[in-house]
Structure formats: C-alpha cells, structure tokens
Amino acid sequence: MRPETMASKLKALNDWVDDVARLTRPDSIRWCDGSDAEAAALRAEMLADGTLVELNQDTHPGCYLHRSNPSDVARVEHLTLVCSKNQEDAGPNNHWMDPAEAHAKIDALFDGCMQGRTMYVMPYCMGPIDSPLSRCGVEITDSPYVVANMRIMTRMGAAALARIEREGTFVKGLHSIGELDPERRFIMHFPEELTIKSYGSGYGGNALLGKKCHALRIGSWQARQEGWLAEHMLIVGIENPQGETHYVAAAFPSACGKTNLAMLIPPEGYRKAGWKVWTVGDDICWMRPGKDGRLYAINPEAGYFGVAPGTSRSTNPTAMETIAHDTIFTNVAVTADNQPWWEGLPHGTPVTDWQGRPYDAANGPAAHPNSRFTVSAKQCPSWSPHAEDKQGVPISAIVFGGRRPSLVPLVFEARDWTHGVLVGAAMGSETTAAATGAVGVLRRDSMAMKPFCGYNYGDYFAHWLSFDKPGAKLPKIFHVNWFRKGDDGKFLWPGYGENLRVLEWIIDRCKGAVGAQETPIGHVPRKDDLHLDGLAIDGTALDTLLEVDPMGWAAEVADIGHYLDSFGARTPEKLKAEQRRVAAALANAGAPARKVAAG
Ligand SMILES: Nc1nc2c(ncn2[C@@H]2O[C@H](COP(=O)(O)OP(=O)(O)OP(=O)(O)O)[C@@H](O)[C@H]2O)c(=O)[nH]1
Ligand SMILES: O=C([O-])CC(=O)C(=O)O
Ligand SMILES: [Mn+2]
C-alpha cells in the first residue's frame, strides 16, 4: 500500500482524494496496490477485529466468513438514485433527485464519517486490463471488507492506476459504511459527472462500486453515448462435439439463474458425446459491434459474487469446486466443525446461523437467502481460455428469461431484432431476496435491468433498436423460462444442467439446423425439435412447457402495451408498433399453429 504521500501522478485524482479526505476526515489514507502482501495484511486486521471469521482451513483453505449487519443484507432499490440534471433522463424506472440537492444531502452524511478510520483508495479496471472495451474507476472506501471483495471482483491496484494515469479519466466512487443505519443510507449516481456516492451499506451491490453502480448504471449511460451495451448478462461458451464454440449472453434478473447457467455441467449423454461449457462471465456483459458487424462481449468483472443457497454438488458442481478454497462467504451459517453451510447442501448441519446465533429453525433459514460467496473467476474449472481476450468473444444468441410460474413457455425465439427487443422489454419476473422488499411478486424487469439501467427505459429501448442497421450481423434473440410450475407448485422443468438441451436448440436455430413452430409470440420448438433422450420428464409436463395459450398471452401483451406507454414519448414508436403486431396476431390466433421449416 502506498502511504498518503505517494499519491498518483494524475492531478485530477490527487485533487479528488484530497477533497474527499477533507470532507470525511480519516485518520489515515492508504492507496491500494492490489498485492498479495496488502491483502494478507488487511485480512489479519479483519480477523483481529472480527470483520472476518476464519472457517475450517483443513476443509476450506483460505476461506473466511463475514457476518454483515442484519439490516444490511441486500440491495436497497428505494434508496438507489440516478441524479441526472434532467429528471426525464433518469426516467420513471429510476428514483431521481436533483444533483445539487443530492450532493448536499449525501455530503452531509459523509462529513467527518471516516474519523477514527482508514480511508482506502482503490484504482480498478472493469474488464481485461489491456482491452479497449474496458473502463476504469477509483473507489474510495473506509471498509476493508469492501477492499478485500473489490480485489477479487475487479482488476484492482497498480496496473489499473497506470491505465488511469495514461487515460486521464476514471469513474469516481465514494463509499462509506457510515453507521449502517437503514435510515441513513443512499446509493447515488451522477452519470453526467461519472460519479457514484454510496453511504450506509456494506452489502455487495451497494458497496462494491465497480459492480452494479459502475459497470451497469454509469456503464449503461456511457454505453448509450458511445454506441455499446452494458447489460446484466452472463456470457457462456458452448462447445459442441465438433469443437465449434458458440457464445450466448443471457439476461435473467437477480437470483434467477445466471451463475448457474454460466457454469452449467452438461447432462451425462452430452458429456460423453464431447460437449463442453466455458464460463466467460456470470453477471455483467459489455458488448459492442466489431468490424465484421457481430457483437463482441467482455466480462468486466474478475470474480463471482454468487448466491450461496441452492448451490450444491447436484445443482452446480462447478461453483462448488470454485469456492472450495480462497473464498469470502457473507452471511452463511456454519457447522460444528466450522465449515460454511447453507440451505440446499445435502450434508452437514448448521449449528450457528448467519447472524452468529445458535441455529434455531424458528428464526428462519440458517443462511440468509441472499448470502453470497466472493471468489476469483480464475478458480472456476470451466473458466474460458477466451475470458481475457481483449477484443471479447462473438455473441451468437441473446437470451432473456425470468421467473414465470405460468404462461411463459420453456423457450421461444423472436422473429427478428425488433421483436427481440420487445421480448426483452416485456420481461417479467418474480422478485427475489437479492433486493430488500417482498419476494415472489411478479413485476416487469426489462432486460433484467430494472434496478440497473442508469437512464430512461424509453431511451434504452431506442438504443437497443439502433443496433439494427446495415452491415450489422446481430445475434438471434430468445426467451427462456426455467421456472414454470405445475398444479402441485413444483417446477415442471428439471433445469440446471438440463438447460443445455434448450441451449442446443437455440444454437441450432442460429445455424438454421433445427425446426420450430410459428406462434403469435415467436418460434417455439415442437417436442421432436428438442433432444430429450435420457431426460426424466413426463409428456404432459412437456406439453405444458411448450404450449402457447392465446387468451393468456392476449392479456399479457395488452399489459405490455400499458407498460410501454408508462415511459411516455420516450418509448420508440417502432416498439409500440411491434407490440400491436403481436397483439393482432394473438387476436387472430383461433387457427392452429403453422409449421415452419428450419432456418
Ligand atoms: N428451478 C431452477 N432453479 C434454478 C435454476 N438455475 C438457478 N436456480 C436457482 O436460482 C437461484 C439463483 O441462481 P443464480 O444462478 O445464483 O442466480 P443469478 O442470476 O446469478 O443471481 P445474481 O447473482 O443475484 O444476479 C439459486 O437458488 C439456484 O439454485 C434452474 O435452472 N432451475
Ligand atoms: O448486485 C448484487 O448485490 C448481487 C447481484 O449480482 C444482483 O443483485 O444482481
Ligand atoms: Mn446480478
């Protein structure tokens, strides 16, 4: 760590650090270089003051547990603001405050807040350090836990600082855990100033500012200006037995299966035949058109901040292997022999819950439903050899999806880009524990970006449409739903590794190698179009998964129309016309679905 006196060569950076120090009045300032020695020293400090607890080092070498304040366990959407000069630019999809008022409000909280604490200055790079698609930032924080996580989640330290000094621009992120009072908490974004101010929370999405705040909210604003896309998407490479790899980018809302799909293990028959899956990213995707007209994507992150509950050898063995060592666990339970534990693990018994209390089922789950692991991407056994390619990987298909217990089929394909943008805009999903508030409530979550789009959704839809221009070789767009339920309330589709069967159909559609049936909502596979050998699923479940109910869909599409209108004049007319086209097709849908040829 560089002591205060060895500040950066970049005057703008030094000046900002000085200003922040004057406001927050820390006892000392440390510039982080990202080294192992620095990480080890910080860890020792956190173990000494209880910020980290050592886990069983025989079974989990290098693994530690952090228990957060029980009031600080998830993103807080109602306290997350986009403070653009013009309220219309933030749009009805964001909470907004006038920038001057917002600065005044949050600076009053920052005033003197680091007294008695150390202020850490972390230069970081989102994306491979040498990629033209990458962007840099500097986060200032008083939380060593945040430093430890940022070191895993981003390229943090000396190399990032060198790039920042070369480029001269960076996103400014100021964070303090403050007094962890839910009444004194704000996550504010000033896109026109490339600035983030976050106060009063130590939780991942609120505090690791490179992630949702920079890579999505500020990133999406920059992407619109510069002609690229910053999306809440995993990136996965699917290699077929012929050795051909297709990359798929998929947007699912928080806690709806991105990490799992990115690390999928092929079903046994596929594995034997030679199918392989390569993980490029599990949460965020930055993509832009290449010279050949295709979209190329990078993962701006360097690690995974994944949901622990539900992760097991049967659902996600790749993740289990990834987190077997050198991992920070947040808000999980522990067993009698000090191993981390969460709901969904078949073995072990929790003795201490996520709050550090003796486990008692009466207190609810042992691990918090949004408990997380933080781990370096390099530890993932399926980490793609192309994950660090500076030009990114070419995307063959874009997939949207959410938790839809009824109506929405297992998979369907949009007719073209405009229809695909409508499918993404129309996405709905049940809310999850990743944000505070009620769980299981169906809401619209366009492109899984509702909590993350840093500007007006109407403008965002127009930006998406703008990629369809002469010379563009755009990916095909699909929608999936792993979460359809039967009358007994159980999931109809086995999900997880079996999702490869759906990805195979998707990739074959991109190649024109498999058929489908045309319906008013898009192309849906017939049973025979999917490879289902070796899959235990009964015929009626499959019928339900592939059915399109015109009545139910007519109501859904009418609701989508109202939703698009809620963004007023900013919603592109082209998107509304597309919605009317689908509504009209559904109105005519008395006739049986028509068979279409492959391609
Ligand atoms: N039924 C079913 N559940 C799944 C499937 N994939 C993931 N899940 C469950 O959904 C939850 C969240 O999955 P993740 O893969 O961590 O979700 P995510 O989208 O990466 O979440 P964020 O990190 O919050 O963005 C876990 O409890 C999983 O076990 C699936 O195919 N079927
Ligand atoms: O941002 C976070 O805290 C975790 C995450 O990936 C999400 O909620 O989508
Ligand atoms: Mn996420």
Image: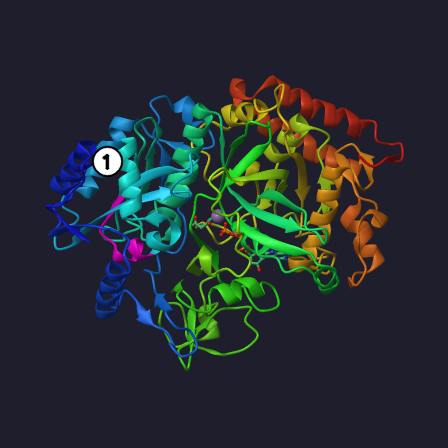
- Vertical placement of residue 576 versus 362, above or below: above
| Residue stretch rendered in magenta on the structure | 139-148
Please identify the quarter of the rendering in which residue 455 is found: top left
In the image, 319: left or right of 170?
right
The answer to whether residue 187 shows anywhere in this view is: yes
Foreground pick, 194 / 404: 194
Foreground pick, 258 / 520: 258
Q: Is residue 353 magenta?
A: no
Q: How is the image coloured?
A: rainbow
- Vertical placement of residue 325 versus 481, above or below: below
Foreground pick, 290 / 4: 290
Which quadrant contains ligand 1? bottom right
Q: How many marks?
A: 1
The answer to whether residue 78 shows anywhere in this view is: no
The residue at the point 42 percent across, 38 percent down is 131
Percent x, y of residue 290: 54, 30
Percent x, y of residue 110: 19, 43
Which residue matches tag 1?
105
Could you tell me the amino acid type at mark 1? Lys
Percent x, y of residue 113: 17, 48
Please identify the quarter of the rendering in which residue 300 is found: top left
For the N terminus, the quadrant is: bottom left
In the image, 64: left or right of 27?
right
Foreground pick, 11 / 476: 11
